[in-house]
Amino acid sequence: MSRPDRADPGQAPAVADMRAPIGKVRYVKLCPVPGGTAWHIVFETEDGLVTLMLIPGQRPRGRNLFEEKDGMSALVRAAGQGCYVIVAETRAKVESTDRLLKQRINWTALRTTSQLG
């Protein structure tokens, strides 16, 4: 029986090349999102805790989406074969995390697990 809180590594949709660490990971869990499942990751940056959602197979409508609501800021950006969402307390923290991800993760190196063999 499939459990939504556990990932099957053989079912991982894709990988990306990480050039350098993005921070100390504090929490990782699979979470339901409209149309699928995302990796929900909370990690420490120099600016404090940040939430990162990796959503395979979904692209944002439009170029990139930025929203501020209820004291939180979020950015949705296309990456590889899906998109990611950054959520933090301030726009500045979201933007600095976005720069960090662009510097340290090579999304264009994305390959499906069937190509890793």
Image (cartoon, rainbow, N blue to C red):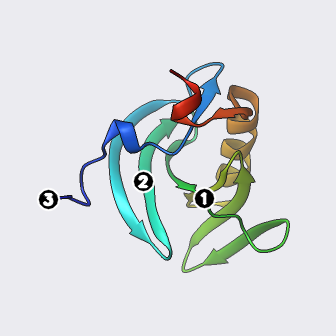
* Callout 1 amino acid: Gly
* Callout 2 amino acid: His
Up the image or down, 106 lies above or below 93; here it is above
Q: Which mark is residue 1?
A: 3
Q: Nearer the viewer, residue 29 or 81?
A: 81
Q: Are marks 3 and 1 in contact (CB under 8 Å)?
A: no
| Helix, strand or loop at mark 2 | strand
Q: Are marks 3 and 2 in contact (CB under 8 Å)?
A: no
Q: CA distance from mark 3 to mark 2?
A: 22 Å
Of callouts 2 and 1, the N-terminal one: 2
Q: Residue at x 65, y 50 (%)?
A: 93
Q: Is residue 66 left or right of residue 27?
A: right
* Callout 3 amino acid: Met
Percent position of residue 9, x then y = 35, 37
Q: Is residue 78 left or right of residue 27?
A: right
Q: Residue at x 34, y 45 (%)?
A: 28
Up the image or down, 65 lies above or below 45; here it is below
Q: Which mark is residue 40?
A: 2
| Helix, strand or loop at mark 3 | loop
Give neighbour class at mark 1: few <14, some 14-19, many 20+ (Cα, 10 Å): some
Closer to the eye: label 3 or 1: 3
Give neighbour class at mark 3: few <14, some 14-19, many 20+ (Cα, 10 Å): few
Q: Which residue is mark 1?
A: 57
Q: Which mark is residue 110?
A: none
Residue most extreme to the left: 1
**Quadrant of image for the N terminus:** bottom left
Give neighbour class at mark 2: few <14, some 14-19, many 20+ (Cα, 10 Å): some
Percent position of residue 60, x then y = 72, 68
| Helix, strand or loop at mark 1 | loop
Residue most extreme to the right: 63
